[in-house]
Image (tube, helix red, strand yellow):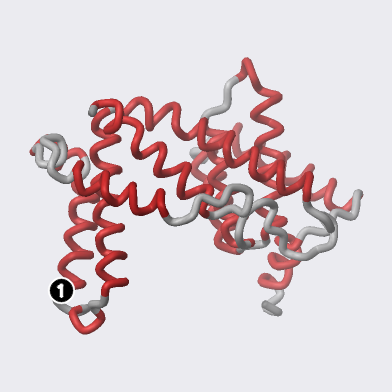
Amino acid sequence: MKFLKKYILFAFLIENLFMQTYVVQLGMWPFYITCGIGLVLMFSKEFWSKDTYLKCKPMYLLALIYILYQFTIGVDTITPRSLLYLLAKVTTFVIVVVSVVTDWQFYARKVPVYFMFVVFAVLLYGIITGNGLNSGERLKLGFGNVNSTSSIAAICFASAVFFWKKKHAWIYAIVAVVSLFAVFAGGSRNGMFSLAIIMLVWTGLSVKKVVYAGIVLFMMWGVINVLHVNLAGVGRIKDTIEGIE
C-alpha cells in the first residue's frame, strides 16, 4: 500500500501528460482507475491526519470549495458529467496530498526531473516528425494543441534551470534550448508569460543571474534574426506590444 501511496501521483502526472499528446493514446480507462484509487486513498489514515492537514491545507480548502460550490450556487448545473468532474477534482487533491506526504523528497527533488525528460522526449519526437518548423505557424510538437505545447514546455524549461546539474550540464542545456524553442514555437502568451515569471524567480533578482539571463536572451534574439528563425511566439509578442493582437 505504501508503494501505491508513493507512486500514484507520479503515475497520475505522467498519464495526464500523455493525455495532452498524440504520441501515446491511453483512452479513458487510466482516468477511471485513478479516480477509483483516489476514492480508496480518501479513507486512508494519512488523509485524515491533523499533521497532513496542516501541511497541505490549501488542497483541503480547494476540495471543500469545489464541493460547496456544486451543492449551493452550482446546484442547478448538477448532471452526471458535472458530478464526475467534481469527483475527479476531489480525488486529484486526495492523491496529491497522500503521495506528497508519503515521500516529500521524491516529489520535491526527483519527480520534476523525471517529468522534464518525458516532456523532452515528446518535444523531440514532435520536432523530428514535424514539418514546417520555420513556417511561423503555431506548432504542436507532439502535443494535442499549441497552448499545451507552450505551457508544458515552460514547465520543462523550469525543471532544467532549477534542477541543473553541473555534471550533466550539456544534457540540461539541450533540454533547456529545446524547451525554449517549443515555448515560442507553440506561441501561447500564457506559456511565454510563465517563462518570464520562471526566469524572474530563477534570478532571485541576483545581479549575476540577471546578467546571465540577459546574455542568453540577447544571444537568442541574435540567433533568431541572423538565422531568420520564424517562430509564432516572437511574432505574437511583437503584435501584442504594438497593439495589433
Q: Determine which residue is flagged by label 1.
A: 71
The residue drawn where x is 71% and y is 39% is 177
Provide residue 88's location: percent of width, then percent of height.
30, 58
Q: Pick out the residue farthest to the top.
A: 167
Would residue 16 be seen by someone viewing this image from the given angle?
A: yes
Q: Nearer the viewer, residue 223 or 137?
A: 137
Provide residue 104's location: percent of width, then percent of height.
31, 29
Where 222 falls versus 231 (above or below)?
above
Where 188 falls versus 210 (above or below)?
below
The residue drawn where x is 63% and y is 39% is 120
The residue drawn where x is 66% and y is 72% is 240
Image quarter hosting the C terminus: bottom right
Q: Nearer the viewer, residue 134 or 11?
A: 11
The residue drawn where x is 24% and y is 26% is 2
Q: Pick out the residue farthest to the bottom.
A: 76
Provide residue 78's location: percent of width, then percent of height.
23, 77
Report whether 181 appears left or right of 94: right
